[in-house]
Image (cartoon, rainbow, N blue to C red):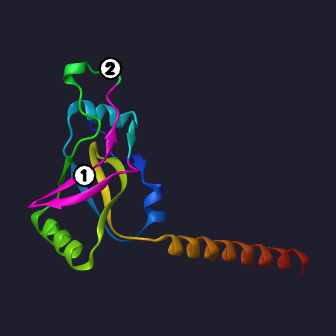
Amino acid sequence: MKPTGTQIVATNRQARRNFTLGDTFEAGVVLKGSEVKSLRESKVQLTDAWASVDGDEVWLNGLHIAPYSRAQAHSGHEPVRRRKLLLHRTEIDRIRMRMQVERLSLVPLSLYFKDGRLKVELAFGKGRNVVDKRQDIARRDADREAAREIARARQRG
């Protein structure tokens, strides 16, 4: 019986902090058997991963999938290797054009199993500098303080 629904394996929480994110889309990933078993145990690090377009193919780079604990040495896999992403030709062309014209990066946001197949959620991202991050933190703190003041005013009145 095939598993149904979605099961999240890993998320890239730093992506939202380090990039201003745009459109998102879903892609399949070409894997080896031992990689799938490791992913089912959530033995993966998505933080340092990025995607690139080479020719007519999209690749996921820097994704670390730990070797499967019960795999034999000769049948295992390389933990950090380029993994091919599965997208339609029109999607690849659209991605390549936007990356070249708008100078964007392809950032993986999450890995998940959807109906038994591994998918990666990708987004266009524009790098943020330290000043942008500080402004974002200051804005968040100001909003939090304003919400506290409103709550205190409601309690008094």
- In magenta, the rendered stretch is 46-68
Q: In the rendered image of this protein, does residue 65 appear above or below residue 8?
A: above
List x then y, in percent, for residue 9: 39, 44
Is 80 displayed left or right of 91 in the figure? right
List x then y, in percent, for residue 47: 41, 51
List x then y, in percent, for residue 142: 68, 76
Q: Is residue 118 or residue 54 the one in the foreground? A: 54
Q: Amino acid at mark 1?
A: Leu
Q: Quadrant of residue 64?
A: top left
Q: Quadrant of residue 81?
A: top left
Where disc 1 sits, the SS reads strand
Q: Which mark is residue 60?
A: 1
The residue tagged 2 is: 70
Q: In the rendered image of this protein, does residue 121 appear above or below residue 154?
A: above
Q: Amino acid at mark 2?
A: Arg
Q: Quick check: is 59 in the magenta stretch? A: yes
User: Which residue lies at the image location 38% right of the left edge and 53% below the top edge?
Assistant: 110
List x then y, in percent, for residue 4: 32, 44
